[in-house]
Image (cartoon, rainbow, N blue to C red):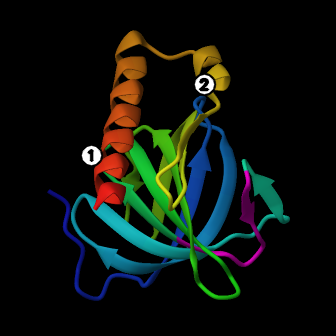
Amino acid sequence: MKTFPANSPTHVTVIKLDASGRETWRYPGRVIQRQANWIVIEAFFDRPDMLLHGMPLLRGDRFLETYFGDRWYNIFEIHDRRDDQLRGWYCNITRPASIAENTIRYIDLALDLLVFPDGRQLVLDEDQFEKLNLSQASREQARLALDKLKRDFQQKLQM
């Protein structure tokens, strides 16, 4: 089990890789909480404003991002830059993240889950996922991760 010293860095660099291992995005984050197999960071959306299936994503929106070293997904909780109101969650199906002292690396497997505060869920990019060159075992892990996220959010938002 990896442990981090009490004086671990408060800032990390997130590195997103595609399924072939090529870097596709890099950005800074501030560590909010850290344990041996997971980390929560705060990061700010740094791309042009866009509308994602009715959910606005604006440059400067606050993301609370949770990465896991033992799970096949990460979860981004999205907050409006103006009033910090919760917009929803964007979940990436990934290989387990590599969480080091100064960096978080994850391999994105294209499949995503978008969850709205009212409980609606949209599975995104299934066509891209199907085109990836993955082993059957990796495909099964990815599908199991997606199913777990869907169930977890259904339970969370029914309360």
Residue type beneath disc 2: Glu
Q: Which residue of the protein is positioned furthest toward the top in this rendering?
A: 136
Q: Nearer the viewer, residue 157 or 44?
A: 157
Q: Position of residue 27 (x, y in %)?
A: 65, 67
Residue shown at 36%/58% (left/top)? 157
- Estimate how packed mark 2 is, as few (under 14), some (14 to 19) or many (20 or more) residues with alpha carbons within 10 Å: few
Q: Nearer the viewer, residue 116 or 64?
A: 116
Do we see residue 101 in this rendering? no
Do we see residue 88 in this rendering? yes
Q: Provide the residue designation for mark 2.
A: 126
Q: Which residues are magenta?
A: 54-63
Helix, strand or loop for disc 2: helix
* Quadrant where the image shows the N terminus: bottom left
* 20 versus 55 height, above or below: above
Q: Provide the residue designation for mark 1.
A: 70
Q: CA distance from mark 1 to mark 2?
A: 23 Å
Q: Position of residue 54 (x, y in %)?
A: 73, 54
* Quadrant where the image shows the C terminus: bottom left
Q: Quadrant of residue 80?
A: bottom right
Residue shown at 59%/50% (left/top)? 16
Residue shown at 83%/65% (left/top)? 49
Q: Quadrant of residue 37?
A: bottom left
Residue shown at 67%/75% (left/top)? 61
Residue 153 within the magenta-colored segment of the rendering: no
Q: Quadrant of residue 68?
A: bottom left
